[in-house]
Image (cartoon, grey):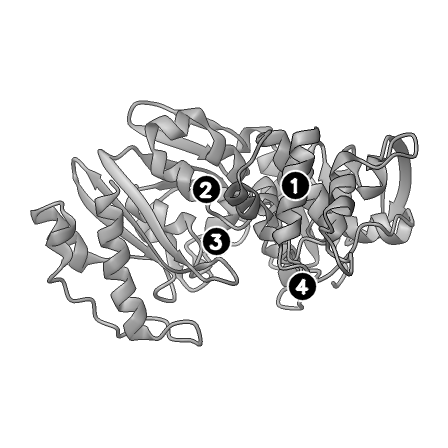
Amino acid sequence: MKKITLEVNGKKVTKEVPDHTVLSVFIREVLNLTGTHVGCDTSQCGACVVHADGKSIKSCTALAADLDGSKVTTIEGLVSNGKMHPMQEAFKKLHGLQCGFCTPGMVMSAIDLLKHKKNPSDKEIRDWLEGNICRCTGYQNIVAAVKEAASKM
Amino acid sequence: MKTFNYHSTKDVKEATKLASSSSAFLAGGMTTIPSMKLGLASYKDIIDIKRIKKLSGIKVSGKSVTIGATTKHAEVANSKEIKKAIPSLAALAEGIGDPQVRNRGTIGGSIANNDPAADYPSACIALNATIHTSSRKISADKFFAGMFETALKKGELIQAVEFQVPEKSCYQKYPNPASRYAIVGVYVAKHKSGVNVGVTGAKSCVYNEKNIVSALSKSFSSSAIDNVKIPSSGMNSDIHASAEYRANMVKIFAKKAVDAC
């Protein structure tokens, strides 16, 4: 067992977890933040993307113990004063989702993209979202939503 | 995933001391963690080396680029110094996996794993790399021993990879449309001392394609490759590409690389 302290969505949490606990399990099963989804569980699909120390990572493929001392933001941490993040608003407005399973990862990954490129082109958005798989939308509306969010952020 | 004892260390000596026949060093974990989840690998001890400060960072001198073992792909891709010294190396790093893999995955992890379709091993071959470990220096042509096999001994830790700055170089790959791993990737580099053609994805292990090397040594142009025959024996053959197809792609991507040099 390892005792670890992380700052998750601005709140410090200290927990004792088995050494092999991955971050996605820590977030979902220890902290009960189930907005972060687990699809493939082997870092292909991107449903589990969160931010760790400001960078997007796949939480299914990082050990919680390894992130001891890190600041983590999950999809739940995007809401401020009950208002959705502009990226979430854009996904809602432009129907950038159907079943919604991939959406938390898409949103977290897309926000990281806008940190690097303020006004990305369609190609840059598609290239960046390479590690996020959606089985419903065909991606068109996701790309449109990221562009809309970029214009608002 | 089977349980293990997680160790995080700040010191190379301590890391190598902790190593045993049932341990693994953990850098980005981009292969180690999924392999453990899938039951392909299990260890008693996982030794995290990311907090060893001296293993991370980029040093550029006139003749060489040295990248610390735990330096992430994104850091290499975005390094202004590497873009200037060996632009093809930064471009290679930019093309590995996806942004989240590039935010965690490391150069040391990539070459220690020696996946037959990994990108970095071809750069090591093309750029006459020297692999600095906790106990010695190994040249790239002796480092990559076979499929997922290297010259590393148990408990030997990669500290840095030193690349020779070439006169010209370019890496071109044909990514699998689904996995984005190289079906074939060819890294061509022209040094004062000679030409190297590092090929990944085509065989069970990265190799220097001597047939193209000798053609380019006579004339460094894509047309010099036109009449080169690449044997298909020993090439990988799977549902994605036959051996004959891969042999042809080695030639085509070598030509592309030379044209883009």
Instruction: Give, as a three-letter code, the residue at label 2.
Output: Ala
Is disc 4 in contact with disc 3, using a CB cutoff of under 8 Å?
no
Q: Name the residue beneath numbered marker 3.
A: B153
Name the front one of labels 4 and 3. Answer: 4
Which of the marked residues, 1 or 4, is nearer the chain's N terminus?
Answer: 4
Q: Chain of mark 3?
A: B
User: Which quarter of the image is occupied by the N terminus of chain B?
Assistant: bottom right
Instruction: Give, as a three-letter code, the residue at label 4.
Output: Arg
Question: In the rendered image, which quarter is residue B245 located in?
Answer: bottom left
User: Which quarter of the image is occupied by the C terminus of chain B?
Assistant: top left
Residue B219 percent coordinates (x, y) = 8, 46
Distance from disc 3 to disc 1, alpha carbons, whole Å, reads 47 Å
Residue B234 in view in this figure: no
Q: Provide the secondary structure element on which disc 3 rests.
A: loop
Near-viewer residue (A151 or A4): A151
Q: Name the residue beneath numbered marker 2.
A: B93
Say which residue appears at 75% left-offset and 63% top-offset. B2
Residue B115 in view in this figure: yes
Task: Give me the disc on residue A146.
Answer: 1
Mark 2 is surrounded, within 10 Å at the Cα level, by few (under 14), some (14 to 19) or many (20 or more) other residues, namely: many
Task: Give me the disc on residue B214.
Answer: none
Distance from disc 4 to disc 3, alpha carbons, whole Å, reads 43 Å
Which of the marked residues, 2 or 3, is nearer the chain's N terminus?
Answer: 2
Task: Give me the disc on residue A135.
Answer: 4
Distance from disc 2 to disc 3, alpha carbons, whole Å, reads 26 Å
